[in-house]
Image (cartoon, grey):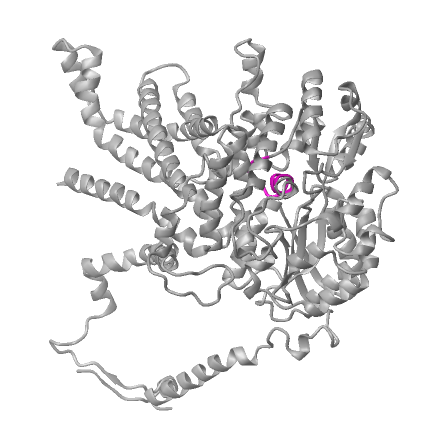
Amino acid sequence: MIRREITTPTDRLFSRRRFIYYSAALAAAVACGPAATPATGSPAASPSGPVQLKGTKVNLLHWTSFVPDEDKWFKETLVNDWAKPNGVDLTIELVAANEAQPKIVAALQAGGGPDAMLLQWTWAHLYADKLSDVGTVAEKVGSDGGGFYDAAKQNAQVQGVWRAVPFGITGNAVHYRESLLKQAGGDKFPATWSDLAKIGADVKAKTKLFYGQATGHSFGDPPTFLNPFLWSYGGSETDETGKKLAINSAATKDALVAFKDLFDKASDPQCLSWDDSSNNRAYAAKQIWATLNGASIYLTALTADPDLAKDTQLVLLPAGPKGQFSLGTPFQYAIPKYVKDPGPVRELVSYIMSPKTYGGFMKTGGKGYTLAPYKKGEGELWPSSDPKFDPFKKIGTLTKWYGYPAPPSPAAAESGSKYIVVDMFAKVAQGETPESAMSWAEGELKTIYKL
Amino acid sequence: MRAETRERPVTAGQLPTIGEVLDRQGVLAYILLLPGLLILAAFIGWPFITSLWLSVTDQSVSTSVARFVGLENFTSALKSQIFLQTVRNTFVYTGVTVVFKLGFGLGLAVLMNQSFRLKNLARAALLLPWIVPTALSAIAWLWLFDATFSVFNWAIVRSGIADRGINWLGEGVWAMTSIIIANIWRGTPFFAISILAGLQTVDRELLDAAAVDGASPWQRFWRITIPLIRPVVLIVLLFSTVQTISDFQLVYVLTRGGPANSTHLLGTLAYDVAVRAGQLSQGAAISLYMFPVLIVCVVALLVYMRRSSV
């Protein structure tokens, strides 16, 4: 048997009674901790009140643009013009577009990470419950910018609540070699898909170069080409309500038949493996005569290959029987709910998105690669005097969103992430019948939309 | 100041000292195992249990509170053509690559077991594909298979074999062939080096005695060498099967599962569904479909090791 006498100060400190006392005190402190921590949207953090910037740290997760000047603007201009004068320790973390989502998902699930993140497409609808309401910032930005485009608003607003602030739209236009088109007897780029199939076949026969369009699993070019193609024939995943599947339809079949015709006559099977950078490389290497892309191809050629740039013209996508459509790649700033003091982040987003700053970004950054999400972007803020860029002015108005004509939804975002529409077209290009491809897509969409 | 007074009567029932406890082998073994077990529990056990839990809930990136849904995620996966195609892809990919890696690995090991000049350099070079980070070597393969700039296609066209190159990553069958080639290239050294280690344990006297008795080289290889290295081959086969079936990096870099899902493996599909589409529970369920196959491999391995140690 061990017999102990409590005689030392240490023993007194850790007596049984005192242990219980300290434990209770500690438990009470832990329980009260979260309540004592300033919550998101607390008065101290309100954007309407004064925000203490000096000495704060902000970590911004951004995508690596295909136009290096845009990255430079963030890394240098933004830091020098906003962060340093305000005493903010601003970190810009750049990640490739295809790698952004894993980082964002990990941060949201872990409840910690970047203070602001650049979302793509309709991701705000996927992550809505974990994103702060940024309505005050979004409303002011929209109002100052002359109003957001419908697509920008649809992508960022979830059931009436702004879960993100629209940042911009990467517009896209068909880049084509005018000289090659003329060699094949064309005087201007075809206005309809059927004409593109015809003239594309002629150019291919004459020059051995094809219309190169990515149809693989990649974030930008495949969906921005194939969704507008589908819509222009009247096809869509669902009806306007989003409550009824519409993919297995005569309109979709027409689109698939027309695509197969275009693909076989004017394109090349290698496009099935292309990602977003493949057509940039192929166009720069003069392996293709035309492709849909953001302005990065033209902007790069201006310095790297002026002759190619001179021969390059830009037009919007051709029209189908139901009209002309476009799908720019939309981006939005979101502030996760785990950010305890969103005040400085809101200030940062407000600063970037103010027409004055954004106009500077468009001029010195991408020169029109990323387009403003609001209407002043195509007016007084327009960054270029080069008339070749003019087609991009219409992108904001023309562009739709994943799930169109229904409002954006988590299911539409999931479908986009799973490349259902892209793969439906790819299957037909590979030789599957339109009926089989539509039936496959319908089966997948039934699970996704739970209809 | 009062002196500290502690009494510890020496009786037959007294508690042992720390030193005495550590002297007991059974206790010491568990203490030494503890750090490893904790690491396994933290980085393998906990994620595995979490994925088990996720797979029976409706957790997505946006849901704050997950709801128990039973086996719904598993049954809904079976309704998806993409999933069924992915399962087929995974078995084809694993089966074909493991067979070829075994064949090439065995051949290389036998070759490296011979005496020749610069043998050590050749052995070191043999390991290169396995040492280079997969993501890095996959990018090299991406260029080799690139539709526009493929050096293979350049050689095919220049040598007059065909008018145009192969659409390596753009056609389903060729895309699968491409990722299989890249995997075989990467995995063969693991087989070769492991089997080479086994070959070096084969007693020369046995082979010499068989030669004296008139056995041909083929008979010596087939009747003596192969039975002796069988344990190594089996273990390498099982390890490789486990690694290949859960492969991710090669496919992710080369095709991302395309074209039209013809190269999706369970790992890449689970990633797409869980991370890109935000459906964490569905992604967990898809990845857990690997578990029965892996468990068969692991049990087979454990049974074999137990038998050979008896």
Dividing the picture into quarters, in which one does residue B212 lie? top left
Q: Which residues are magenta?
A: A215-227
Q: Position of residue A113 (x, y in %)?
A: 57, 60
Q: Residue furthest front?
A: A250
Residue A78 as seen in the image, left or right of residue A407:
right
Residue B258 is at least partly visible in this image = no
Q: Is residue A335 above or below residue A291?
A: below
Q: How many tags in the picture?
A: 0
Image quadrant where one finds the N terminus of chain B: bottom left
Residue A114 as seen in the image, left or right of residue A186:
left
- Does A346 lie within the magenta span? no
In-front residue for pair A378/A404: A404
Q: Is residue A136 above or below residue A310?
A: below
Residue A154 is at least partly visible in this image = yes
Q: Residue at x 43, y 22 (%)?
A: B121
In-front residue for pair B246/B3: B246
Q: Residue at x 59, y 50 (%)?
A: A100
Q: Position of residue A414 (x, y in %)?
A: 52, 51
Q: Residue at x 69, y 44 (%)?
A: A326
Q: Position of residue A367 (x, y in %)?
A: 80, 44
In-front residue for pair A34/A192: A192
Q: Is residue B155 above or below residue B2?
A: above
- Does A220 lie within the magenta span? yes
Q: Residue at x 38, y 84 (%)?
A: A10
Image quadrant where one finds the C terminus of chain B: top left
Dividing the picture into quarters, in which one does residue A57 lie? bottom right
Q: Position of residue B52 (x, y in %)?
A: 35, 57
